[in-house]
Amino acid sequence: MDQIINWVYGQIVGFLGDFFAHMGNMGVELFEMSWVQSIVLFFSYLAWALYGTGLMVSVFETGIEYQSGRGSVKYAGLNAIKGFMAVGLFTIVPIELYKLSVNLQASLTAGITGYGRGISEIASNIITTLNNAGDVTSVGSSGIFGGLSVITSPFMALFIIILMGYAVIKVFFANLKRGGILLIQIAVGSLYMFSVPRGYIDGFVQWSKQIIGLCLTTFLQATILTAGLMVVKDHALLGLGLMLSAGEVPRIAGAFGLDTSTKANIMSAVYTAQAAVNTTKTIVQAVPK
């Protein structure tokens, strides 16, 4: 039984070490690939096409409303400027904001933990201490889990290590898919460029909030995880609580209107695209007449 427990302990510690080693700029590296840049460029061209169509529709709508005395050239011009700024920046600002949040998080954690130390460095020290303990029965007296009396049961040490692994894995996979989510949001954002020059910016504002929520989650999750790793050595249970709370950042951000999910955003964008297609068909059929 002791051999089985020691083998499980060694596998868990090694697994955590690999996970910590791979945490970093995973999402940022995605946008440095040439094929991803080509996808972003494609949706940029699509957005410009939709913007041009929406601008033509806005001109027709302004002319029709102007005949009845309700049209406003100033309002239409402002919407055209807003649309031009949106279509020119929607592929640039989200990526740069995401890179800024990652770099800011790295700088903040380095300042808190000491220069040059981040998630990987702190985790490496913990993994090294666990490995130096020899086996799981010696972990309780190694001092790695502070705030607790000497752990006599190896299952208690395994339980704490498993909780640490769960918190790390949850944040790891969240960071791993966040770059793909940002790419999806950029693709979906192009479909709003038909509505912005016409003055319908509610969907685009919600899209902007989702971008901000994603970048905020990127910054907070890694920061709280690092804080939990720092606290584990002094107060094990408090540190575990901080590490587990890092996975709740997206849910809390969504409660304040910064939802990072793409379900509602995609449905709204699809509706906008359908409206663009239907309106364009109507204009094309009406021009020959």
Image: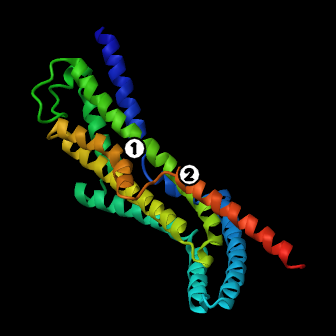
Quarter of the picture containing the C terminus is bottom right
Which residue shows up at 21% across the image and 26% down it? 139
Return the residue found at the far top: 1
For the residue pair 269 and 64, the one nearer the viewer reads as 64
Q: Where is residue 244 shown, x and y percent of the image? A: 30, 40
Q: Quadrant of the N terminus?
A: top left
Residue drawn at x 36%, y 27% is 12
Q: What residue is disc 1 on?
A: 171
Q: Nearer the viewer, residue 115 or 87?
A: 87
Residue 128, x across and y down, in percent: 29, 36
Vertical placement of 21 versus 255: above or below?
above
Q: Residue at x 40, y 39 (%)?
A: 170
Q: Position of residue 234 (x, y in %)?
A: 14, 41
Which amino acid type is shown beneath numbered disc 2?
Answer: Gly
Corner quadrant of residue 116: bottom left
Determine if residue 64 is in view. yes
Quarter assignment of residue 61: bottom right
**Residue highlighted by disc 2:** 180
Q: Secondary structure at mark 1?
A: helix
